[in-house]
Image (cartoon, helix red, strand yellow):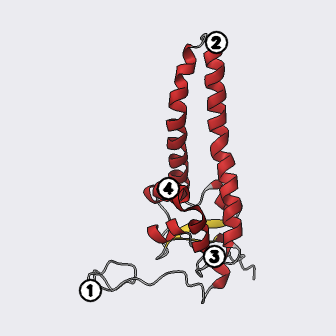
Amino acid sequence: MSYSDSGNAWRNDGAVQPHAYDPYLHPELFRGVATRRAFAFLIDMVVISVPVILGYIFIALFGIVTLGIGWALFWLAWPASVVWAIVYYGACIGGPSSATIGMRLMDLELRTWYGAPGYFVLGATHAVLFWVTVSFLTPFVVLVGLFNGRRRLLHDVVLGTVVINNSVRAPVPQAARTY
């Protein structure tokens, strides 16, 4: 029995939605994704690092001005950095473009396996799971992406996400007819 006859509604008859992005039918969605994803990661690390470095500099200068008392804030810097990174990924992936700043610059976007855009909790979980898997399984995380058609890394497989070329997915607007 299905909720409605439209294809996007929920179903309780045991049917599973097919993958929205098939690498064999649409290989252009995944062409060059692995390389551009690595560059997007580097760009995101710069975006995340700049406010963290500025925060450390502020605490250091504040400590000098307060004759060392302000240096007690250094214990907050590491937890604040982690919270900042999680909020950054969650807000960017949960935003209208479903991509971080680095992903946008590299023309990539994150989607769920069934084609829905990302949301805040998915983006935050994606970041946390990435760092956890990289911490314990560094070579395996990268190798998984080389051996599947969708170029999904280990944390993408676990979360059910896929990173695709944005310009290929998004239809190009047609010019207005002037006749």
Amino acid type for the residue under numbered disc 1: Asp
In the picture, the disc for residue 2 is none
Q: Nearer the viewer, mark 1 or mark 2?
A: 2
List the residue tagged with mark 2.
Answer: 65
Q: Earlier in the sequence, mark 2 or mark 3?
A: 2
Mark 3 burial class by Cα count in 10 Å: few <14, some 14-19, many 20+? few
List the residue tagged with mark 4.
Answer: 132
Q: Residue at x 62, y 18 (%)?
A: 62
Side of 81 where 31 appears, left or right: right
Residue 15 lies in quadrant: bottom left
List the residue tagged with mark 3.
Answer: 146
For the residues labelled 4 and 1, the Cα–Cα distance comes to: 36 Å
Q: Earlier in the sequence, mark 3 or mark 1?
A: 1
Q: Earlier in the sequence, mark 4 or mark 3?
A: 4
Amino acid type for the residue under numbered disc 2: Val
Side of 12 where 35 appears, left or right: right
